Structures are given as C-alpha cells and as structure tokens.
Amino acid sequence: LALRRCSRAWADAVSGAMHYWCSSADDVPFSSDARCASQMDPCVTRMATAARLCVVCQAYGAIQGWLRVVPYQVLPSRDPTKMLADAKLVFRYVPGATGVRFSGVGPALTANVAALLPLTLESFAVENTTIDDAV
C-alpha cells in the first residue's frame, strides 16, 4: 500500500514536471486554464521514452489531460498489431487529442488504427508512410 501511494506521488510529480516543462517552453504560465500547453516540448519528444511517459502521465497530477497534440515519437511501431495496441493506449490517455502525427510507420497505419482516432481531431499528418486505401 505504501509503495502504491509512493508510485502515485511520483506519477503526480512526473506529470506536473512534464506539464511545467512544456508550458514554460512556450512561455505559457503554469496554471489550469485553457492557455496551458497542449503539446510536448521538442526536447521531450527527442526521446521516445520521455514522450510516451508524458502520455501516460496525463491521468495524474494537479493538471490532467493537458496534452492535445500527439507527436510521431509516441506511435513509432511498424508492426500493425503493436501499433493498434499502442494507439488504444495513447487515445485512452489523450481522448481529446486535436492533432496526431505518424512518421515512417509503413503498413502499421491500418483502418483499425484510423478508427481509433478521436472525433476532436483537427490535424492529422502522415510522413514517410504509404497509406492503404482502406484507411
């Protein structure tokens, strides 16, 4: 039980740090209003592990669900089965995504993955990827 509480505290701290880092990089004040950062800072996305951590931390901390733009580093798989599982996870934590970007994912961008894209999507970018007609 103590470990679970410690883990929650660390998740809260990581979430807050990620948000603070991304919002301060955009010169956005650290607050809970709509002006908060909606995307990751480039220094976070340089490392896929940090970018994915930023996604799963959306459910923790004082400011939750601030991420709206999903960078391509979060969904890098070229395997259709893994991409589908990853997309389900990402859109569970970022249900109100307004932008998503895919790069170099080849055949992994299937109709099943496209069906998971949220209705709130305003921008969709695909680079270095052949898209099947079914998508």
Image (cartoon, grey):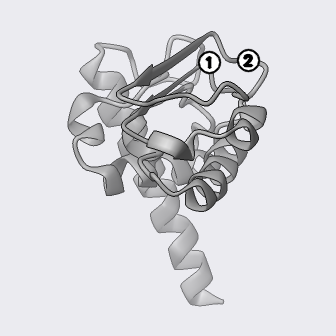
Give the label on residue 98, or none.
1
Q: Classify mark 1: residues with Cα within 10 Å, few (<14), some (14-19) or many (20+).
A: many
Q: Earlier in the sequence, mark 2 or mark 1?
A: 1
Picture coordinates of residue 51, whole percent (x, y): 38, 46
Q: Amino acid at mark 2?
A: Thr
- The residue lying at 54 percent from left, 46 percent from top is 108
Picture coordinates of residue 99, whole percent (x, y): 55, 20
- Number of numbered discs present? 2
Residue 96 visible at all: yes
Residue 37 visible at all: no
Give the label on residue 120, or none.
2
Looking at the rendering, which quadrant does residue 63 occupy? top right
What is the quadrant of the C terminus in the image? top right
Label 1, secondary structure: give it: loop
Q: Amino acid at mark 1?
A: Thr
Looking at the rendering, which quadrant does residue 5 occupy? bottom right
- The residue lying at 67 percent from left, 17 percent from top is 121
Label 2, secondary structure: give it: loop
73 and 107: which is toward the camera? 107
The image shows residue 95, relative to residue 127, as above or below, that is below
Picture coordinates of residue 84, whole percent (x, y): 65, 52
